Amino acid sequence: MGKEVLTLIILTTTSLYDTGFLDRICNEFEKEYRCKTKIIAVGSGMAFKLGKNGEGDLLFVHDVKGEEKFIKEGYGEKRYVVLKNEFVLCGPKEDKMSLCNNIFEAFKNIYTKNLTFISRDDLSGTDVKEKEIWEKINLNPNGKKWYIQTGNGMIESLRIAEEKNGYILSDISTFLSHKKEFKNIGLILKDTKNLENYYSIIPISDKKFPYVNSVLSQKFIEFMKSEKVKDIVENFKFEGKKIFEIVE
Amino acid sequence: MKEIFIISIEVVLISSLISFIISFFISFLILEKRLKFLFVFFQSFLFIPSVFLGLLFYTLFKRSGLFGFLNLLYTSKLIIIGETFLIIPLMVLFIVNGIKEKFYEIKEINRVFGGSWWENLVLIIKECKQSLVSSFIVGCGRVIGETGLAMIVGGNIEGQTRLFSTSIVLFTMRGEIEKGIHTGIFLFVISLILNFLYFYFAKNGNFFKEY
Amino acid sequence: MEISLRNIEKSFSGVAVLSNLNLLIKNGEILVLSGENGSGKTTLLRIISFLTLPNNGKIYYKIENNVFEYKSPYKPIREVILKISYLHQKNIILKGNVEYNIKIGKILRGEDNFEDTFYNLIERFGICDILKKDIYEISEGQRRIVCLLRCISVKYDMLILDEPFTNLDSNYIEILKSFLNEEKNKKKSIIMATPGLKILADLHVDKILQLGKDGKIN
């Protein structure tokens, strides 16, 4: 009678995965619970779609509205907020945007001065947040010449911002982990209050998809509160700065 | 939007055309001077991963790169240049194999009767029209569905470098599967139409005529 | 035009096809190369007509009082080329109709005049009724005649024919033979290769070269 190794399938977004953070967490998880993990990192939009098709055991994403909709439609039961980091505004190093008090001012400035702005337009968590800000200040940049919509991932869009000397909203982890690539753009504005970024885990409903591994999903959520993970989060730094924070 | 249509058609036609002219010249050289090593050289690049070529172009054309001053990165012009290079090995393979036999026959006739190099060239093009057109279409087909290079070098920017192929990538990222499939089918139908058009015109040359 | 070959040697992949070949061809001669398949007939014909370079040896062409030496196939001597017409062993056909396939010879030569002599020749060989037919719609034998006509419709001093009689029926064979005899009387030289000698009856042959393992036996 052989011992079957269980596999936990995690549907996540590229911004969480690209930094290598999730890999570290999963390595420890595999060791501790003697199982395997499979990380499927796609855009947030796709992650939700896969979740609705029951293609994984849990979602690990950062899009509050999408998550709430997911639960409302019955694909998941509860969301567990486990991590926090922030978005930052990046842009041309020689700029004056840092004089703004908050992100809303900065966006208004960009709009009125027709400054080049790079948007991802891929329904990712970052993209959704960016669109929220435009909504809040009641401005619509769509169709403006300076508003460039790439259909690309975070790091590619950052590279486009670098090339075109434009502003872009990015999650801090992706930017810091690739910082040495960028000569033209740098971190312009931090607005921790308004640019909070929460990562939540939603186990996929086993009522809709009986074959999902809900036991293992729960274990993973517990694991996120463990000392091991606290350790990893403490030590996961770029340029001496801690990227993620545990949410109690 | 239908900017995607215009940009895609531009990219496909221009890169295939330029690549065809270059490949024809190279093939001519290979056949005329019997340069087998040159043929093998180009064949070895046949399966170069398009993402690798894309990466190469990215490194060369980014602002801090060798050709950065040209400001070509993330423009459709650079996609055209990249695709042109990408399909040269393919086109050379098809052209050389397609016109090999007729090339030497015509060369003989031309030698015996003493025609000029220009008459030689015209005869070759006339005799091998079918092979040449099909090589061109093969090139088009390769470009129209290519995403690796187009994404890296173009950035999939709406209204500037978003092609049919790269928009499918975006639809997939966003989870909009149906849109992706619709676009894919549309692309496929276009290539089918291209093929039918080609065969309709080639009928005047009769596919099975020689047998 | 006279052609003189001295000490011609030609090998392919190390195997000697022709060695120590000496030959003199004068005006108004019909010379026949005979021998088994693979004995080097085509090779010799090609060397004479400037299409292939021998490994060793010298070839001299004498036109009126000028003597030209064959140096390189990449720099063909135009005066010599214009004096020779060559028929390939294989039918080389181009897309188009019969008339075009015949005319292309003169067109490439730059002889743009398609007068009575041209059409008389076509009529003599009985091709008139298929002139407008597509080249792919006629038989292999008819194609042979087409290639032959292409070859003989241009101006030449020397006619070099590689197995001209293949695929021809007896009717055409007679027409061709009487044509060649006439050409000989006009002081044109004819060199041809045939696999067998039976076909040469009624042809005013001057010399027969039997190509064996190497050189020749007369």
Image (cartoon, coloured by chain):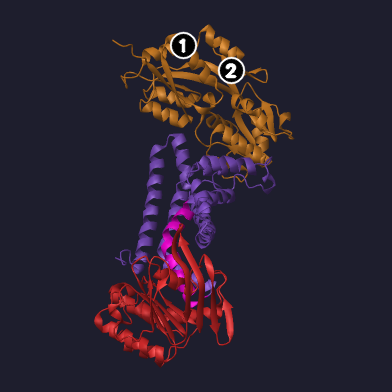
Residue B65 to residue A99: above or below: below
In the rendered image, the quadrant that contains the C terminus of chain C is bottom left
Q: Is residue C141 left or right of residue A165?
A: left
Chain that is orange in the image: A
What is the quadrant of residue A67 in the picture? Answer: top left
Give the x, y percent position of residue A86: 60, 22
Instruction: Magenta stretch: give its range.
Output: B90-115
Q: Please report, as a chain letter, where disc 2 is located.
A: A
Front-lying residue, B143 or C196 = C196
Tell me the kind of residue under disc 1. Answer: Lys
Give the x, y percent position of residue C101: 39, 77
Tell me the kind of residue under disc 2. Answer: Phe
What kind of element bears circle 1? Answer: helix
Chain that is red in the image: C
**Chain B rendering hue:** purple
Q: Which residue appears farthest toward the left when viewing the image?
A: C170
Q: Mark 1 points at which residue?
A: A31
Q: Mark 2 points at which residue?
A: A244
Front-lying residue, C146 or A141 = C146
